[in-house]
Amino acid sequence: MSMKNAVRDVFGGFWSLLVGLRITLGQFFKPIITVQYPRQTVKIPARFRGHIKLILDPESGLSRCTACNLCARACPSDCIVVEGAKKEGQKTKWVTDYHLDFTTCSLCGLCIEACPFDAIEFSKEYNTVARSRDDFNNMDLVARLAQEREVWAQNRPSQPPTPPASAPVTAVVAAAPAASAAPAAQPQPLEQKLTP
Ligand code: SF4
Ligand code: SF4
């Protein structure tokens, strides 16, 4: 190798080093767009579609679902099963069981559009994982709502107010003392699951 080529290689390598450092320094001063997952997570966009869920009413901590079954009828994949019950003396039915087969759900949103009470929505759960698909073919949305209510109750500054006598069955039973709760029966109704 001639001296001329050797000098050209040295300067070429040095120039290459400077170009790399310029790119590195440029990135160093840019805002960070990655997060330390799972300790940090990004903000989930409002239009994100996780599995459907029952909405927890922020005032009462209960579901607004009346088990009218319109969502199940609107579902093209036939993956919703809703059961409801009526408390004696009341005209309205309230949800006791709401199961979703998430393995066949196409996240089309027709069930949400069909609901006249705004009782369901897409959840923001982006990391729904399990060891078996069997965990997703019969998701108990009432039980999930009960878990959500526990968090809601802990973060609430005071106990929920006693609902009036005309309140839905879920609210009345949830406010009643444990001793007056109905005996355990299958399937477990929402009002028992939501009772602290
Ligand atoms: S999003 Fe579509 S497929 Fe999924 S449960 Fe609702 S209606 Fe059925
Ligand atoms: S979620 Fe809405 S449409 Fe479905 S059963 Fe409940 S109230 Fe009716």
Image (spheres, rainbow, N blue to C red):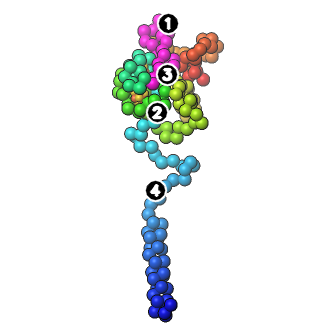
**Residue 83 falls within the magenta-colored stretch:** yes
Mark 3 vs ligand 2: CB under 8 Å?
yes
Mark 1 vs ligand 2: CB under 8 Å?
no
Question: Mark on residue 33?
Answer: 4
Instruction: Please determine whether, in this image, residue 18 is positioned above or below residue 150.
Output: below
Question: Mark on residue 51?
Answer: 2
Give the residue at mark 3.
98
Mark 2 vs ligand 1: CB under 8 Å?
yes
Instruction: Please determine whether, in this image, residue 88 is positioned above or below residue 175.
Output: above
Give the residue at mark 1.
88
The three-letter amino acid code for the residue at tag 3 is: Tyr
Q: Quadrant of residue 55?
A: top left
The three-letter amino acid code for the residue at tag 2 is: His
Q: Residue at x 41, y 43 (%)?
A: 45
- Specify the segment rendered in magenta: 79-97
Question: Residue 135's spot in the image, x, y percent?
Answer: 56, 30
Q: Residues within 10 Å of mark 2 (few under 14, many from 20)?
A: many
Question: Does the residue at mark 3 contact the one at mark 2 (Cβ under 8 Å)?
Answer: no
The numbered mark, 2 or 1, whose residue comes first in the sequence reads 2
CA–CA distance in space, label 3 to label 2: 13 Å
